């Protein structure tokens, strides 16, 4: 059996985390999760606007939440069963650590 690329693993993990209720998406929900200390990982789409990328990377840095740029809006949205999403936050530490590991492996 062939192993799937890490990119698919990240998207699969996001889908699992979403189904278990551990992902919030969209600018407002992501911002609230980070500010309330509920976010363990923020993912920003690579094709998000410069303003969005700057806002969430600065916010993540300030609140000491890991932040990664990954994939494109359409793919991120599709992975979590929604429309395009510029950013999302993983609110479960286990999922966040696992997704982050796959993200770092794919670099």
Image: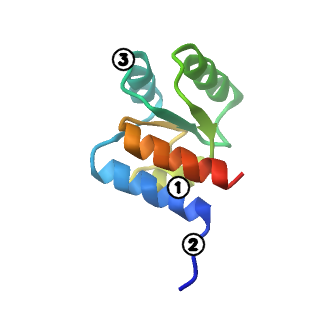
Q: Residues within 10 Å of mark 1 (few under 14, many from 20)?
A: many
Q: Earlier in the sequence, mark 3 or mark 1?
A: 1
Instruction: Name the foreground residue: 13 vs 80.
Output: 13
Q: Which mark is residue 10?
A: 1
Q: Which residue is mark 2?
A: 4
Front disc: 3 or 2:
2
Label 3 environment density (alpha carbons within 10 Å; few <14, some 14–19, many ≥20): few
Q: State the residue at coordinates (55%, 44%).
A: 100
Whether 38 is drawn above or below 78: the answer is above
Mark 1, secondary structure of its residue: helix
Q: Earlier in the sequence, mark 3 or mark 2?
A: 2
Residue 36's label in the rendered image is 3
Q: Secondary structure at mark 2?
A: loop
* Label of residue 50 in the image: none
Q: Is residue 88 visible?
A: yes
* Residue 43 percent across, percent down from the top left: 55, 38
Residue 84 seen in the figure = no
**Which residue is drawn at the image coordinates 64% and 47% (left, top)?**
104
**Is 96 above or below relative to 61?**
below
């Amino acid at each position: 059996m062939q192993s799937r690329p890490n990119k698919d693993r990240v998207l699969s993990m996001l889908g699992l985390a979403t189904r278990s209720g551990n992902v919030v998406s969209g600018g407002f929900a992501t911002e609230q999760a980070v500010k309330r200390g509920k976010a363990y990982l923020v993912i920003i789409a690579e094709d998000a606007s410069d303003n969005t990328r700057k806002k969430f990377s600065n916010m993540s840095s300030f609140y000491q939440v890991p932040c990664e740029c990954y994939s494109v809006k359409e793919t991120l949205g599709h992975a979590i069963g929604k429309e395009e999403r510029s950013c999302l936050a993983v609110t479960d530490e286990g999922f966040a650590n696992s997704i982050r590991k796959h993200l770092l492996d794919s670099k």
